Amino acid sequence: MAQLWGGRFTKETDKLVYNFNASIDFDKKFYKQDIEGSIAHVVMLEKQGILTNEEKDKIVKGLTGIRHDIESGKLEITEEYEDIHSFVEANLIERIGEAGKKLHTGRSRNDQVALDMKLYTRSELIEVDGLIKELLGTLLGIMEDNIDTYMPGFTHLQKAQPITLAHHIGAYFEMFKRDRLRLKDIYQRMNYSPLGAGALAGTTYPLDRYYTASLLGFEGPTLNSMDSVSDRDYVIEFLSAMSIIMMHLSRFCEEIILWNSNEYRFVEIDDSYATGSSIMPQKKNPDIAELIRGKTGRVYGALVSILTTMKGIPLAYNKDMQEDKELTFDAIDTVKGCLALFNGMISTIKFNKPIMEKSAMAGFTNATDAADYLVGKGVAFRDAHEIIGRLVLYCIDKNCSIDELTIDELKTISEVFEQDLFEKISLKTCVEKRLTVGAPGPEAMRKVIMLEKEYLENDKINVVETY
Ligand code: ARG
């Protein structure tokens, strides 16, 4: 048990208290960010004449060495220290002696941890964004290949109107595109540096906070030191955005699970993304889709947890805030894993196009178009709706579709029907005529695909490389 703050204490910390308080088990995850922040801090301290050039060089060299040794496995982050900040500082002092004791000049663990968490969240946010971008590329490919793949569109999980696979996948493209926009928005709002806020009230040392902010790729410093050390809004925002990403993935997974069922058989999940049953030899289960759907709850849980943790915290730093880490880290890893796996699953899935098309023809998906046909012949829409309703009932009774009726049968329902009905309500016409912006008609779809392509090529989060 090695502590940085032993001076004021006369007794050893109780072992249980020590373990309860310690965070090294999880904050070791951002050792890299901790070192990166410390380097920026000492470079600034030297520029401001608070440290000598020699001291700065020694500290930077020591910190870089620690980072290398952790990465090569030579230095293990052990639980004998309370947190990653203490671990790095103690190691530095061990390596370089007296100069190491000056690292923490004008800094508190409160602004340090606020910085580490922000740097970590920021780089993970960029990774999540990259994974969504990859998924969007996959989805766009499927869209381009399936402009003419007919399938039923559903409302209330009942066949409604015919659409295409490109159109269906395009809906998810829009969702994930919004997810990226949300991430970009969060990035811009969070990208201010808390370093230099001290424990809560800044410091009397002449720190240059603008300088450390720019060294670390931030827009500038945060403007209130109390807020700087106690703001976790960006964690909440990131968890909200990730919850929405998971909600989108989960909806998509739900559809894949349905489409993969024996009843639908719209898709066949590749063997490499499916699992078998230990007892039923015929089974090929969509476990990955189910797990992604299931893990959504875990990410929502992290969001609700931090919202609840933060709601009663008075200004400024309170130890409750240490609870911002574990579930957030878990949520980030979960979302990254789910995005990568989902991308793999959807890019290898086989779409059973003939089955989809056959399904689109059944279930009276052309009933609206049949009503529109009557409207074209001068019948008021409300009357047309009524006539087609009766026609559907007649077909249900006969167990056939509208296009399977003869013209004589049709005329018993309404005299207005002519031979041209069959062409007007064919699957091809029903889809091709839907040409409003955002509709499934191939011409409309092609235009949208072009726009989505441009978006994918040009839009990118402004990634600022640090160190
Ligand atoms: N482990 C702490 C956290 O995660 C670091 C900050 C400690 N600050 C303090 N005043 N005890 O929040």
Image: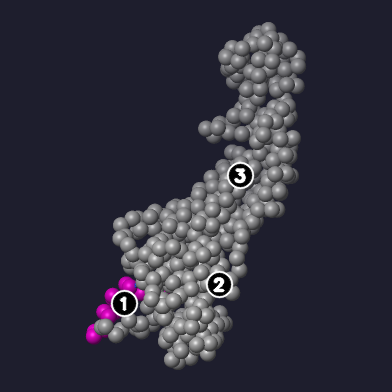
Horizontal side, residue 443 vs residue 104: left or right:
right
Q: Quadrant of residue 371?
A: top right
Secondary structure of the residue carrying tag 1 is helix
Secondary structure of the residue carrying tag 3 is helix
Q: Is mark 3 within 8 Å of ligand 1?
A: no
Residue annotated with mark 3? 174
Secondary structure of the residue carrying tag 2 is helix
Q: Amino acid at mark 2?
A: Leu
Tell me what residue is drawn at x 63 percent, y 22 percent.
367
Horizontal side, residue 311 vs residue 431: left or right:
left
Tell me what residue is drawn at x 50 percent, y 57 percent.
189
Tell me what residue is drawn at x 38 percent, y 55 percent.
307
The answer to whether residue 183 is seen in the rendering is no
Residue annotated with mark 1? 18
Closer mark to the observer between disc 1 and disc 3: 3
Q: Are marks 1 and 2 in contact (CB under 8 Å)?
A: no
Closer mark to the observer between disc 3 and disc 2: 2
Q: Amino acid at mark 1?
A: Tyr
Horizontal side, residue 281 vs residue 231: left or right:
right
Q: Which mark is residue 215?
A: 2
Query: Looking at this view, is 138 or 462 the one in front?
Result: 462
Q: Position of residue 32 (x, y in %)?
A: 52, 75
Q: Earlier in the sequence, mark 1 or mark 2?
A: 1
C-alpha span from label 1 to label 2: 35 Å
For label 2, count other residues whose C-alpha is less than 10 Å away and answer few (under 14), some (14-19) or many (20+).
many
Residue 12: in magenta span: yes
**Residue 257 sits above or below residue 334 on the image:** above
